Amino acid sequence: MKYTPCWSVGWFFVPIANMFMPYWVMKEIWQVSSPPSPMAWRQKTVSPIVALWWLVGIFSGMIKYSRWHYFRSRGPTAFAWEFLSNWPGELDIRWINSEGEWCWGLMVGDIVGIAACILTIGVVLTITTMQERKYDKMLELESVEEEAPSPQAVEA
């Protein structure tokens, strides 16, 4: 394999590289974990769920950690300042609408984040299942080789 276990985790913390390297690592892990076949593991196809997992994860991060929902509203600080400065008077409806837009932006980010978590669980469980099947197949082949008589024993 090209990527070591340390770098498989480490790529998540390297700026710029964390935007694409974890996908390549997961793709390699998927290929190595696939059931044995005559073709080399590097030539095996990867399920589109791996690409979907990464794209939804990137999109989730962009929504959560960007300020896009602030552009449509004045944000919670401005809302709180306006509320306290007009206390106990009336609050202008545009501020309530602005706060609502800000909250909707956060909610969309959370929904995409939940989808990213569900996809992560699906990818990890699928890879775990593939690795367990591959391990069972290897054990099965080892037991068959042990049961087969050696060439010296057949000649005797």
Image (spheres, rainbow, N blue to C red):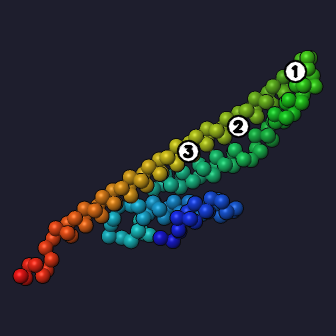
Which residue is at a point 49% across and 46% down the rendered structure image?
A: 121
Residue type, numbered disc 2:
Leu
- Cα separation, mark 3 vs mark 1, equals 38 Å
- Residue 137's quadrant in the figure? bottom left
- Residue 140's quadrant in the figure? bottom left
Residue type, numbered disc 1:
Leu
- Residue 19's quadrant in the figure? bottom right
Q: Position of residue 144 (x, y in %)?
A: 20, 66
Per the image, label 2 sits on a secondary structure element best described as: helix
Q: Using the image, determine if residue 68 lies above or below residue 130.
A: above
- Cα separation, mark 2 vs mark 1, equals 23 Å
Per the image, label 3 sits on a secondary structure element best described as: helix
Is residue 84 visible in the rendered image? The answer is yes
* Upstream in sequence: badge 2 or badge 1: 1
* Upstream in sequence: badge 3 or badge 2: 2
Q: Of residues 103 and 140, which is closer to you in this image?
A: 140
- Cα separation, mark 3 vs mark 2, equals 16 Å
Which residue is at a point 53% across and 68% down the rendered structure image?
A: 3
| Residues at discs 3 and 1 in contact (Cβ within 8 Å) | no
Numbered disc in front, either 3 or 2? 3
Is residue 24 visible in the rendered image? The answer is no
The residue indicated by pointer 3 is: 117
Label 3 crowd bin: few (<14), some (14–19), many (20+), radius 10 Å? some
Label 1 crowd bin: few (<14), some (14–19), many (20+), radius 10 Å? some
Q: Position of residue 15 (x, y in %)?
A: 70, 62
The residue indicated by pointer 2 is: 106
Numbered disc in front, either 3 or 1? 3
The residue indicated by pointer 1 is: 91
